[in-house]
Image (tube, rainbow, N blue to C red):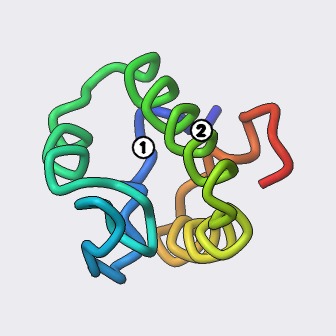
């Protein structure tokens, strides 16, 4: 069984332009968010982080673009995409 949450890559999709109140226009994370994701060890923490991020992206209208890029990133890294485990239309 694949460890979807344990192996979840960073939600960063390598756009890194901080123009929306200190949040990246690609992934909607702040610099602090990016640093904190790297320190998350448990699957529950990663799941909570990604769930909150998906909700933020939905509110901002950036979910379709980000979800496509994140799925591609997971595929390139050869890991299961955590979005498939979330109850969202990502």
Asked if disc 1 and disc 2 are in contact, CB closer than 8 Å, the reply is yes
Q: Quadrant of the N terminus?
A: top right
At 34% across and 19% down in the image, what residue appears?
A: 42
Which residue is at 33% across, 79% downward?
14
* 13 sits left or right of 81 in the view: left
Q: Crowding at label 1, few (<14), some or many (≥20) Cα neighbours within 10 Å?
A: some
State the image coordinates of residue 46 (x, y, percent, origin top left). Answer: 41, 30
Disc number at residue 80?
Answer: none
Residue 27 screen position, x and y as percent = 44, 64
For residue 51, side relative to residue 87 (left or right)? left
Q: At numbered mark 2, what does the secondary structure look like: helix, strand or loop?
A: loop
Q: Nearer the viewer, residue 45 or 66?
A: 66
Residue receiving disc 2: 2
Toward the viewer: 6 or 13?
Answer: 13
The C terminus, quarter of image: bottom right
Residue in the picture at 25% in, 73% down: 18
| Circle on res. 7 | 1
Q: In this image, 52 relative to 25: left or right?
A: right
């Amino acid at each position: 069984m694949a460890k979807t949450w344990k192996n979840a890559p960073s939600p960063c999709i390598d756009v890194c332009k901080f123009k929306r109140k200190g949040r990246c226009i690609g992934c909607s994370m702040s610099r602090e968010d990016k640093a904190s994701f790297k320190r998350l060890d448990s699957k529950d923490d990663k799941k909570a982080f990604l769930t909150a991020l998906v909700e933020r992206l939905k509110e901002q209208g950036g979910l379709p673009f980000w979800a496509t890029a994140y799925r591609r990133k997971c595929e390139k890294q050869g890991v299961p995409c955590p979005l498939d485990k979330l109850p969202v239309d990502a």
